[in-house]
Image (cartoon, helix red, strand yellow):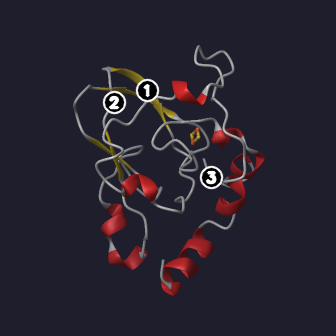
Amino acid sequence: MNVLQKVHFLKVSPMIRSARSCPARWYSSSSAAGKDETKFPKNTIEDLNTSQEQPTNGVIYDKKPFRMELQEGKRYSWCLCGRSKGQPLCDGTHKLVQYKIPHRPVRFQVEKTGTYWLCNCKQTKHRPFCDGTHKCEEVQKTSGK
Ligand code: FES
């Protein structure tokens, strides 16, 4: 991250760093998966690209996840920058030079066709899936949706 990107990042999302220290939790305690991290949905192409490894998170788009039907074998691009108008998926807004956005979308596929909860707060540690981080005080107290 260059100096210009760092300044932009701090200006648009001052609380992002503290949100990273929130413990991972599921969005619902009644989830069959419980708190076992091995039960998080798997991004089957996680090892094929580096978009998963970006060190910072985008701005908070919403304080709750988005439920979405996903098809096995289909490739999706999850918005990490938080500025897409087609949330939770990328619409290319991160490419607009005037925003100087350092983030790229996270490419992903799911193992099975089904309903998934995708992160909309952009602070999850299990991109692109919701891990309950949106329940952290740092996320909930921000002004946003
Ligand atoms: S919406 Fe749940 S972790 Fe982001």
The local secondary structure at tag 1 comes to strand
Disc 1 residue lies near ligand 1 with CB under 8 A:
no
Q: Can residue 6 be seen at all in this image of the molecule?
A: yes
Where residue 81 appears, as percent x and y from the top left, is 45, 59
Would you say the residues marked 2 and 1 are in contact, meaning their CB atoms lie under 8 Å apart? yes
> At x 30% / y 35%, what residue is drawn?
109
Q: Nearer the viewer, mark 2 or mark 3?
A: 2
Of label 2 and label 1, which has the lower sequence position? Answer: 2
Q: Which mark is residue 116?
A: 1
Q: CA distance from mark 2 to mark 1?
A: 9 Å
Mark 2 surroundings within 10 Å by alpha-carbon count, few (fewer than 14), some (14 through 19), many (20 or more)? some
Q: Nearer the viewer, mark 2 or mark 1?
A: 2
Residue designated by label 2: 110
The local secondary structure at tag 2 comes to loop
Going by the numbered disc 1, the residue's amino acid type is: Tyr
Residue designated by label 3: 144
In which of the image's four quarters is ligand 1 placed? Answer: top right
**Left or right relative to 63: residue 94:** left
Of label 1 and label 3, which has the lower sequence position? Answer: 1
Where residue 127 appears, as percent x and y from the top left, is 47, 44
User: Residue 108: which quarter of the image?
Assistant: top left
Where residue 21 appears, as percent x and y from the top left, is 72, 52
Say if 6 sits above or below 90 in the image. below
Going by the numbered disc 3, the residue's amino acid type is: Gly
Disc 2 residue lies near ligand 1 with CB under 8 A:
no
Going by the numbered disc 2, the residue's amino acid type is: Val
Say if 58 sits above or below 68 in the image. below
User: Residue 31: which quarter of the image?
Assistant: top right
**Left or right relative to 13: residue 128:** left
